[in-house]
Image (cartoon, coloured by chain):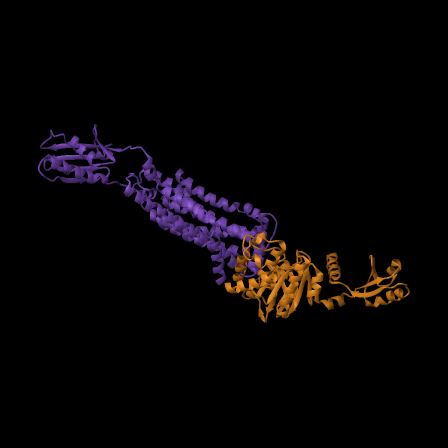
Amino acid sequence: MLEVNNVELRYGDFIAVHHLSFTLRPGEIFGLLGTNGAGKTTSFRVIMGLLEPSQGEVRYFGEKIGYHNVDDIGYMIEERSLLTKMKVKDLMLYVGQLKSMDKPTIMKRMDYWLAFFEIEDYKDKMIKELSKGNQQKIQFISAIINDPKLLVLDEPFSGLDPLNTDLFVRAIRQFQAEGKMIIFSSHQLDHVESFCEKIVVLEKGRPIIDGYINQVKKDFQKLTINISADVDVDYLKQLPGVYSVTNNSTHVKVKIESNEFIEPVFEYVKTLDNVMRFEVEEASLSEIFVAKVGGSREKV
Amino acid sequence: MKKFKFLVLFGLKKRIFKKAFVITNALLGLGIIAVINIPSIIGAFSSDEVETQKVMVENNTDDEAFPLETTLIEMMNLSSGEMRFEAYDGTFDDFWESDVDIYMVFTDALSEPDVDLYLKNQGDQNLVMSSVQAFLNDYQDIQYASFNVIDPPPSDDPAPIDEETRMFIDGIVTILALPIFFLVMLATQFLGVDIIEEKSSKIIETIIASVPATIHFLAKIVSNLGFLILQALILLGFSIVGMGLGSLLESSVDFGALSLIGEITSRVPNFTTIVILMVLFTIFGALIFLALAALIASIATTQEDYQQFQAPLIFLLLGGFYIAIFLPMMGADNFVHIASYIPFFSTLVAPVAYATGVIGLLEALLILLFHIVITLLFLYAITPVYRVAILSYEETKFFRRIKFYFKKAFAKKKAE
């Protein structure tokens, strides 16, 4: 289990991470989100024990995390981080030995994952000769070569086509099924929604959204009603609690402040002919993200 | 410790198992062997000019009419292959101040003479004695001369260095400073490129997620220092091969010339101590330069950045090199003395200062100790900065960036 308790990281007067707290159990996937420069990478470094927090602590299975735990951790950064003049095999041996692994184990695990990602023929190729997608796979394999108990993935799907994304999703699900803890960051919030039970959204190092995704959505309250019918958009806009009406090609999206304002909309729709669809859905993570991060910036 | 060892060996292997390393060293080896044997090579191709020595023989024996000088010179010329002896026509008051190289005074009976022997070059003694003895055998029955070899007069200066030797020592100073400069430059460049390659490719994130930045920093320094020592050993090996080859050539073909190292060792009596000091200053001196190179590389974010930022390091290295090669020749001993204490400069200047007699052995060792202390303090001061800088990608100007990293590093250290 990973416990992040009220962690703060200061450099003099500058606070890089503000009071970050969450708990991650084996088999859970946690989303650490934020805009570029929000403090995600610094938070990852504190969580992995690479940086000592100024306040609070990170505990890994009950003990304070530090460099003695790094062999249990896999880390994939957002940008390409490979020594491209090396052969795939040599890079794996290099990264594996940095994680205190012996050569036969590295080779065995490398062969397994190269086969999983359908790139077993590239073992003796220079990394610079590979396509971007295949380099991304190599980077992912180098992060998991040590069979980590805690896997930190920063934008793992960046630059991948749908087929390769599916391979990555399967790999991550496999880790989850094996009881590994996964911290995940992505700007593709639909992936976060599909993977993570819990999230923290950072803005300037400060958590502005924190908790289980279901609860976050409930707390956000705002809802979207999708209507397929001949509606009077201007009338809808005047209804109480309605703050946005968008006319799409197939349906109209009506955004309301909370569930108590569903009723007036529903009453209006009942009066219409040819109603094909009336659907109430919670706000997407993307909407919550934009609303909260935008709101936070407006306050500043 | 295991990871430190792995990083050190990985860095070393990365440098050594390269075609470029093998080819460069093969070319260097040929060059060194050739340079060491330059006198022999020149000797092999030079004209048959022979050295001439002036001889004067005074016959005060019972047979004063005998042409002793002519006879002896003929015999000496017969015995000597590469040297020519001829009679000196003039007169002199003091042999040691004169142009005469060999002066013999024969007294008593010529068949069994007493011979006072004055020699400028003690190496001529055997030839002269054997020629006299051969003459006696021809002159009459086998008799023996009684030789009295006259020592040169004592001097007030216990170890005078003549002008020629002084010029020679000042001249070879360049040769002493050059390998230090070459090795330190090579090692710092390799270290800088190594770190900046890891940083600009972002693989540093993966590395620092596996080993502490301090271990990475020290491993890079040790690995490149190891490379420097290995390269120095290879150069030394080539020098030994060159000397061996020179000796072999001299024994098989008489070029009448020593190898360059032979020439140096014959003229500089404390050459071995100088070489030992050079090695010590190269190793410990390289440490401070490597630490500086690592710091600069950690502050840079791209190869271009590093090329620009390494200017201070290059200036320090070149400054030391120029002080070491030019100032001794200009006779600026005081300046050389002061420069041998200045950190960074001392790496190149101190061994040269010792070689040229500006400082003694004890002072050279004290400077080395002082340099080691300064290097340790420097390492202590910059390690926290390296830890902060290696994972940062600031794009501000060099000095602003350094200031920022120092501030951040020491704010963090204070907080810890």
- Give the drawing colour for chain A: orange
At x 11%, y 29%, the residue is B65
Q: Nearer the viewer, residue B185 or B416?
A: B185
Q: Position of residue B377 (x, y in %)?
A: 48, 55
Q: Position of residue B326 (x, y in %)?
A: 42, 39
Please, is residue A180 above or below residue B54 in the view?
below
- Tell me, by letter, which chain the rendering colours purple: B
Taking A276 as reference, is A86 left or right?
left
Q: Quadrant of residue B171?
A: top left
Q: Position of residue B61 (x, y in %)?
A: 11, 33
Please, is residue B234 above or below residue B212 in the view?
above
Taking A240 as reference, is A67 left or right?
left
Q: Position of residue B340 (x, y in %)?
A: 42, 46
Q: Quadrant of residue B166?
A: top left
Taking B25 as reference, is B135 left or right?
left
Q: Quadrant of residue A252?
A: bottom right
Taking A283 as reference, is B133 left or right?
left
- Residue furthest out toward the bottom: A62
